DNA sequence: CCAATATTTGTAACCGCTTACATACTCAAG
DNA sequence: CTTGAGTATGTAAGCGGTTACAAATATTGG
């Protein structure tokens, strides 16, 4: 119980060798440079006294912590959210075998608060995996000035010089539009996410661009903002139907809004998909279990996380080239054709 | 871009003072010991060059990392699990204001793998928050020998000298039994969790002890193991009914098994709660949304996490006394009386 | 048996910071 | 003008490792 504090000197003394020899013995790469007899003695005593090297000292000399920081916004329900659960799962599964660990970095959404100094001061990690950057980094240039390599997941902004991993939301919007259009839908309403979402903008733009090419223009009062929220979408449905009672389809920019829309439609006696088709975006876990199972555009968040992590770890391990770490890796989006959107041309 | 590497010496040189003065200026506690004029110069240059102190060096001198390790089992779906989401939420919310951060420590379930040395070697954290300890720590004594204070969440084992935060599962079992008994139920089946679960054992023991006092003994073939799994419980229902078709209630040792049981009962035309009452354990998020809303024993996992974190941080900040850090903090369980269990004495 | 070479070990500088202690400087009171 | 108490700053010794380089020892071949 009275475990006197051990360090490499004490152990060296007990074994009767120099600290250099101990250091060699405990590090796999240098272990073979120690005579096997010495090794045996060292191992025995290390085990006996329960010596473990001090990681802070190691970090200091090696200038590496073998830890990456995972930046999440600090929000009450964040760990109950599908999106972040996927990211956690992806990051940890990918990191597990690499010897890296991760530290959670929760940042409050205070525009302008995080300047270069504040943020860097608190941490010492080898790299950063950032989600929803725009929520806390008011000044985009900060990201480029970070003192460690960063990978940003989603929310691609081409004006930022950093490494992004995301999907083509614009294309996703087009795919959704194509699916509805080719199923015969012409009068369509859109449930939009909040203004702050860069991704939302692309989803809508892609959707409208496709339809425009087909000669269809959605009236602006049929594009209603529901902030990505289930209950807001729920509340907007009747307003939409007042604007145009004859719509045959709704494009919701995320699944949550699709759920809200369908829930309300059911309540007022309108069937989905028989009367109105609904298509979502994201492919959340609930989408498949929903009634009706939701047709949606799948965003592979888990894969985004694993690919981003791979990119970062790979750079960390091989950045001898000192190349700047930037670029955009795009993973495919995909239509998941379930039951909530049907062909009405028959 | 060519950010030459800065350290406290370089900055001291640029400002024209000694490193001690810089150190005082950048640490809130010692800042007042620096003349205000000097302070101004220092702040300006620090900002200009974007200097940030090296945390590894700080950790080394201060012998503290302001980081705690959160130990989870490494399982594929861990971040999608309610249980762990609650813990993540509790820990992070409680930690946020304290200046501590947390690092995820995922441990593979390999009995006997983690001995004292292996585990400690990889980490340098000020303390540890441990979940499901028995999955990776084969040798109980390891926990007591850890070189940092540990808090163990749930799975209380009185033979281990450590600090636990948990609930009284035995009492929970009794409460469940009382609820069924006083609602008139006498013929009851039990869906049990897996053998490795210490908590499961207590739940069942409490349940049986209560009934035994009332003169009721549950036949052993009415206590069937379903490993905490929804689909296993689903599959066991008919076997139970074959053993005793006249049971009026089922005690499931967790909610998942209750869900499975009810799902199967519905399918074979038996109504819950009209024909058979079912009571669960845990009060998962889905319990309230289930059809029928599940009567269950609530385990406040989120609170377990926050209380455990408080305990740990508090100890870390005030352990001048050098007292050993052990004890058992028990939070109350509680009957959540919803619709899946009814009174049949009427 | 000795020189040449390979293997093993030790010495000491360094990583970037904190802080006890020493020193220098201010300024009011005697 | 001294003296003494603050106040402001500097010096240097750790904290616990890694590693280049030097030194000692072992091995090999002629």
Image (cartoon, coloured by chain):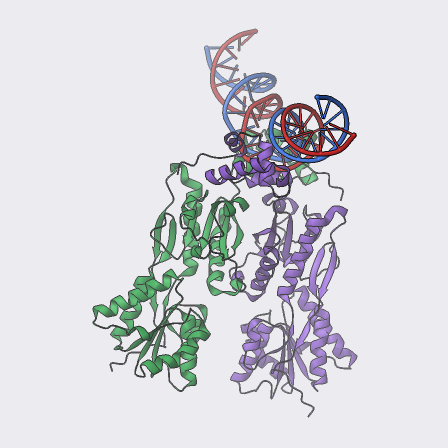
Chain colours: A purple, B green, C blue, D red
Above-or-below relation of A108 to B149 = below
Give percent across and percent down for residue B220. 30, 72
Identify the residue at the far bottom of this view.
Answer: A346
Quarter of the image with the C terminus of chain A is bottom right
Above-or-below relation of B269 to B62 = below
Give percent across and percent down for residue A66. 61, 47
Give percent across and percent down for residue B32. 54, 32
Quarter of the image with the N terminus of chain A is top left
For the point 45% across and 68% down, the residue is: B285
- Where residue A182 sits, quadrant-wise, is bottom right
* Whether residue A93 is visible: yes
- Where residue B304 sits, quadrant-wise, is bottom left
* Whether residue B56 is visible: no
**Horizontal side of residue B300 vs D6, given as left or right:** left
Give percent across and percent down for residue A257. 59, 74
**Horizontal side of residue B93 vs A128, given as left or right:** left
Residue nearer the viewer, A246 or A205: A205
Residue nearer the viewer, B33 or B156: B156
Above-or-below relation of B277 to A35 = below
Q: How many numbered discs sit on the rendered protein?
A: 0
**Horizontal side of residue B39 vs D5, given as left or right:** right
For the point 50% across and 44% down, the residue is: B117
Above-or-below relation of A167 to A4 = below
Residue nearer the viewer, A59 or A176: A59
């Amino acid at each position: 119980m009275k475990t006197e504090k051990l360090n490499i000197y004490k152990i060296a003394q007990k074994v009767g060798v120099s600290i250099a020899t101990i250091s060699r013995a405990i590090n796999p790469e240098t272990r073979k440079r120690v005579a096997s007899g010495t090794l045996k003695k060292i191992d025995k005593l290390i085990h006996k006294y329960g010596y473990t090297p001090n990681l802070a000292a190691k970090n200091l000399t090696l200038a590496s912590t073998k830890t990456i920081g995972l930046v999440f916004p600090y929000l009450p329900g964040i760990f109950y959210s599908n999106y972040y659960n996927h990211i956690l799962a992806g990051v940890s599964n990918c990191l597990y075998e690499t010897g890296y660990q991760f530290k959670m970095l929760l940042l409050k959404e205070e525009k302008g608060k995080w300047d270069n100094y504040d943020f860097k001061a608190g941490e010492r990690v080898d790299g950063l995996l950032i989600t929803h950057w725009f929520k806390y980094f008011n000044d985009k240039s900060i990201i480029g000035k970070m003192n460690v390599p960063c990978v940003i997941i989603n929310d691609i902004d081409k004006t930022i010089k950093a490494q992004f991993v995301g999907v083509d939301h614009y294309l996703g919007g087009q795919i959704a539009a194509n699916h509805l259009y080719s199923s015969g839908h012409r009068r369509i309403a859109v449930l939009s996410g909040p203004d702050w979402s860069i991704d939302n903008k692309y989803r809508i733009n892609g959707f409208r661009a496709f339809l425009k090419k087909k000669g269809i223009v959605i009236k602006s009062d049929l594009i209603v903002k529901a902030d990505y929220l289930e209950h807001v979408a729920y509340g907007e449905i009747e307003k939409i139907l007042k604007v145009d009672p004859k719509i045959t389809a709704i494009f919701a920019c995320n699944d949550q809004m699709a759920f809200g829309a369908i829930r309300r439609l059911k309540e007022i006696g309108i069937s989905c998909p028989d009367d109105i088709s609904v298509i979502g975006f994201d492919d959340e876990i609930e989408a498949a279990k929903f009634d009706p199972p939701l047709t949606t555009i799948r965003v592979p968040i888990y894969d985004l996380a694993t690919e981003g992590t791979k990119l970062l770890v790979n750079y960390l391990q091989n950045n001898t080239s000192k190349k700047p770490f930037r670029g955009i890796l795009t993973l495919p989006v995909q239509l998941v054709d379930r039951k909530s959107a049907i062909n009405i041309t028959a």
